[in-house]
Amino acid sequence: MKIAVVGTGYVGLVTGTCFAEVGIDVTCIDIDQRKIDNLRQGILPIYEPGLEEMVTRNVDAGRLHFSTDLGAAIKDCDVAFIAVGTPPGEDGSADLKYVLAVARGIGEHMNSYGVIVTKSTVPVGTAAKVRREIEQALEKRGAQVDFDVASNPEFLKEGAAIDDFLKPDRIVVGVASERAEDVMSRLYKPFLLNGHPIIFMDIPSAEMTKYAANSMLATKISFMNDIANLCEIMGADVNMVRRGIGSDARIGPKFIYPGIGYGGSCFPKDVKALIKTAQENGYQMQVLQAVESVNEGQKEVLFNKVKKHFGAELKGKKMAVWGLSFKPKTDDMREAPSLVIIEKLLAEGCTVSAYDPVAVTEAKHSLGDRITYAEDQMEALIDADALLIVTEWPEFRVPNFTVVSRLMKQKVIFDGRNIYDKQELEQAGFAYHCIGVRT
Ligand code: UGA
């Protein structure tokens, strides 16, 4: 089997590389020549644990190719994945111009049966638009080529993408023909050895499944953030409540950690897009609207605690920030709560010294030299009036608190991810503020 993956962003690169890993011949296509040149040398545009080694291994084995030539790759492939970006437009709806341009390109070059699969997160109805775009391009050439479209949404998490792809909980595929179902079954067979299912359905349902999954997860998080805020007011401890409800199998222990709001490229974008799709079709997604507004508020919760603690004295204080990326194990800064928090601190006249193991280059695009970037986590603490835990990187979990207190000017910690034990820190003389526990 031969496949093409168009778009070497996060999803495309992981998809192409993981298919190559199980022995399939994969060509990854991108219009950006520099990106392709870099990838051929094993230089990746993103940070994802384990991916660089896997790319290099498969390129060396001759199974993974990188090219800007869509035409050549499309000519003899069985399956083509469209994995280009769908950036949110001004109004929150997904912009399909890149997806449809790729579909056109495919129609201009394909000359034998293939399944064209949308992998990018796309609104319900996109696969039908892709089909029309390909048909029109074929007509223009006067070519008659049989093809199918399919929708195969991706559920991988940044930072755990390879594992999620190689050992998926489930694979969802929307198809409209038995032939396409057969091709997709054969393609995914190597990934189903753990007994988890491939679920075939109609195309609109597959497209909707992706939005429903991300929206449900975002709902769990905003719900728990609301509960955490109420716990603080009422004198309850959200860590206890979380364990109490998470042990009910109907609720489950995952994705009920309160914090400083969800970020990243997926939840904020997909929640907005689903609200927008519903509105365009005369329906109000009331729960999701609340999910979004709770999340906006939650990004300010940690800052509000800082402001409450320091009061009128906040101006001129030095704040140490540990973690910048929207979550650990990624350098992704899109919609990162750190940006909201840092902008607010700067607006109050604070200085900020931040440390992040991998996201500094990305962070500089937004924050530039308005803050300082420490070489390691301890350096960030020198003379700081407070430490803010913004991203729960594993290396922040058990710092040497004796060194921490020696370096800091004041022993104050604002923990936006609830990674420390309140009692332990208070015994060590710290003022400790976290989420969902009354100070
Ligand atoms: C998310 C989904 O989890 C993937 O299944 C999906 O494929 C992906 O979006 C996508 O649509 O491409 P991702 O954005 O990489 O993956 O990150 P998550 O691990 O889901 O975290 C999202 C946000 O929720 C982070 O800001 C994280 O800090 C926050 N979060 C997560 C919480 O605040 N509490 C939790 O309990 C869990």
Image (tube, helix red, strand yellow):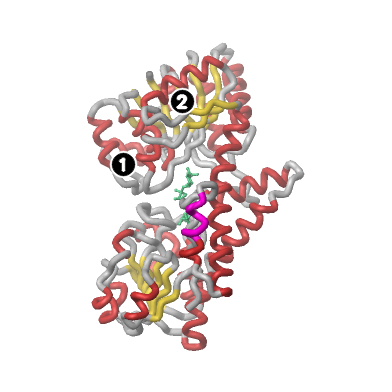
In front: label 1 or label 2: 1
Give how far across and how far down residue 352 sits, in percent. 39, 74
Question: Was residue 245 drawn as part of the magenta stretch in this picture?
Answer: yes
Q: Which residue is mark 2?
A: 80
Depth check, front residue: 412 or 242: 242
Q: Is residue 411 left or right of residue 346?
A: left
Residue at image coords 53%, 69%: 300
Q: Amino acid at mark 1?
A: Leu
Residue 272 visible to the viewer: yes
Residue at image coords 53%, 56%: 221
Work out whether mark 1 precedes mark 2 in sequence or the reverse, and give the earlier one: 1
Please identify the quarter of the rendering in which residue 391 is found.
bottom left
Q: Amino acid at mark 2?
A: Ala
Give how far across and how far down residue 396 sits, in percent. 32, 65
Give how far across and how far down residue 108 sits, in percent. 52, 21
Q: Assign a secondary structure to mark 2.
A: strand
Please identify the quarter of the rendering in which residue 131 is found.
top right
Pointer 1 local density, CA inside 10 Å: few below 14, some 14–19, many at least 20? many
Pointer 2 local density, CA inside 10 Å: few below 14, some 14–19, many at least 20? many
Q: Residue furthest bottom?
A: 312
Q: Is residue 367 above or below residue 134?
A: below
- Region of the chain picked out in magenta, as a range: 242-248
Q: Which residue is mark 1?
A: 51
Q: Main secondary structure of the magenta part?
A: helix
Residue at image coords 70%, 53%: 286
